[in-house]
Amino acid sequence: MSSYSVRVLTHQPVRLALTAGGMALCVLLMLFLLAIYQAVSDGSVEYVRRSNADLWILQKNATNILRSTSVLSRDQEGALASIEGIGVVTPVLLQLPTVHAKGKAATIFLAGYNPHRGLGGPPMIAEGRGVQSDGDIVLDRSFAARMQVRPGDTVQIQDRDLRVVGLSAGTNAFVIQYAFVTFNTARAILGFPGIVTCYLVKAAPGVSLVDLRRRIEQAMTGVAVYPQPDFLANNIRETENGFLPILYVVALIGTVVLTIILSLLLTINILERRKDFAVMKMIGAGKFFLPTIVLEQATLITLAGCGGAFVLFWPAAQSVEWFFPEIAVVASFWHAALVLAIAGAVGVFSALISIRRVRQIYPMEVFE
């Protein structure tokens, strides 16, 4: 890196600080978008991913539990249990009631399941214990922080008191969070005892899932049977369809703004040093010497902006999670590498835009 490039940039320290700060904010925005998307992706599908089920049975034409409606009959459990090859079958009832606690109210994605069958419960218990009996409830830890409740406190759903016995992790879907109760409690809250959202099936040891799926489809009408990997893929696709377009638009806007800011600074530097560049051309500077200087300046600003963003990210993320518990941030090395690559590409592209000005400088301008 030439000392000339450094001198040009540091000659206007305020301008350099503003440009590097603007780049840092754009990079920070990209890092936040990726981290929030990762958290939403994990929180939306972790329940499905860790369900321990081999097959999911829903109403026909329902493909997921995030944005599909599935209504099955409670009576179908007996028919399922009689099918050869099924080891465990358990109903799950999903609904969206309002939780009241300490003068606050919020909607929760409530899952009612049988805690004694090992299917359909919280993916991870972060604090306390799981549901054991009617009257117990496990809340997502982000939801609990927002409502300011802890294990041992009581919350109300439809004037029904429920004791918070644990907090779950991997259940924050950003716009809504999961909670877990027994199937009987969920059925009482809903008020329609014969309704089930879906059935989770665990095959008996040694049973072919392909054959078991075919037997279930032959024995029952109006249902769709999904193997665990397929059902997980369906829910991931729904998550991406709902969130990725927003991510792309905001990231694109940030990238365009970043390119404009950097291109303007580099162009201004070239115009201010126009005579210096003319002198360099007059004394025989090589064809790539001046473009290399512009590229070096872009690289220095990019590195300064990215460095600032990486330093600010963790304190900023912790502050956001402190003030807004429902916003989870999950970052990784790959996120940093991706954003660094994007910022590098923006730096190179901005330099190429500005280099056109260098080509318009003629050696004879020295004598003007």
Image: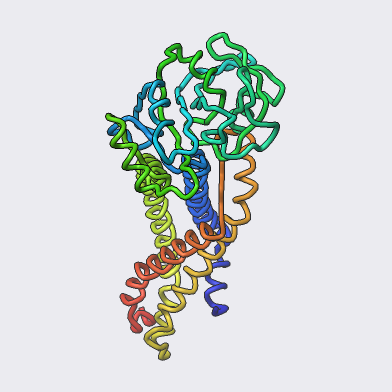
Determine the residue located farthest toward the bottom in the rendered image: 284
Q: Position of residue 90 (x, y in %)?
A: 48, 30
Compared across the picture, whether 249 is left or right of 314 comes to: left
Q: Is 197 drawn above or below residue 310 in the view shown?
A: above
Q: Position of residue 3 (x, y in %)?
A: 57, 78
Q: Position of residue 130 (x, y in %)?
A: 64, 31
Q: Is 354 drawn above or below residue 95 in the view shown?
A: below
Q: Is 255 drawn above or below residue 83 in the view shown?
A: below
Compared across the picture, whether 272 is left or right of 12 comes to: left
Q: Position of residue 39 (x, y in %)?
A: 52, 44
Looking at the picture, the colour scheme in use is: rainbow
Compared across the picture, whether 90 is left or right of 140 comes to: left
Asked whether the viewer can see residue 312, the reply is yes
Which one is nearer the viewer's eye here, 11 or 256?
256
For image coordinates 54% across by 27% down, the residue present is: 114
Which one is nearer the viewer's eye here, 11 or 60?
60
Residue 295: name its quadrant.
bottom left
For image coordinates 64% across by 43% down, the residue present is: 318
